[in-house]
Amino acid sequence: MRRQACVIGGWTDPRGSRPFFGALLLGVYDEAGRLHYVGHSGAGFTDAEIGRVWKRLHALRSKISPFHATPRSPERPHWV
């Protein structure tokens, strides 16, 4: 099994009946300290976990993308 530690750089709006967020926007730092988008993840959360994570992320929200190149997303992104 391969693993990669990632940084949460933001989240997307939820789709359908899911509350709080659709997916977390993930990145990794390069040798120069730039954060690069590597993908997103939205699976595996209970409704309670989604609410706890969103509350923490919402408190850290920013108007500026933390990624070196702003990723495209079909859903509206929110940055941390």
Image (tube, rainbow, N blue to C red):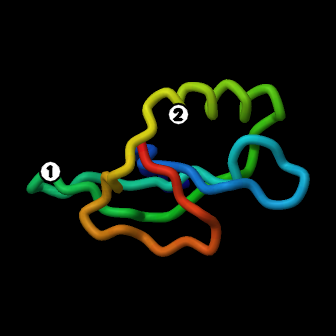
Q: Is mark 1 on a helix, strand or loop?
A: loop
Residue type for callout 1: Gly
In this rendering, is residue 74 above or below 4?
Answer: below
What residue lies at 35% left-to-right and 56% top-to-bottom?
Answer: 65
Q: Which one is in front, 42 or 20?
A: 20
Residue 13 seen: yes
The CA distance from mark 2 to mark 1 is: 22 Å
Residue 79: give x, y in percent of width and height: 44, 49
In this rendering, is residue 46 above or below 29?
Answer: above
Residue 27: give x, y in percent of width and height: 38, 55
Q: Locate the N terminus and report the quarter of the image it occupies.
A: bottom right
Q: Which one is in front, 46 or 67?
A: 67
In this rendering, is residue 31 above or below 58?
Answer: below
Q: Quick check: 78 left or right of 48?
A: left
Place residue 14 in its image quadrant.
bottom right
The label shown at residue 7 is none
Residue 64: give x, y in percent of width and height: 33, 52
The label shown at residue 57 is 2
Residue 5 seen: no
Q: How crowded is mark 2: few (under 14 residues within 10 Å), some or many (20 or more)?
A: some
Q: Which residue carries the number 1 mark?
A: 33
Q: Residues within 10 Å of mark 1 (few under 14, many from 20)?
A: few
Q: Locate the C terminus and report the quarter of the image it occupies.
A: top left
Q: Is mark 2 on a helix, strand or loop?
A: helix
What residue lies at 53% left-to-right and 59% top-to-bottom?
Answer: 77
What residue lies at 14% left-to-right and 50% top-to-bottom?
Answer: 33
Residue type for callout 2: Leu
- Mark earlier in primary sequence (2, 1): 1
Nearer mark to the viewer, of 2 and 1:
2
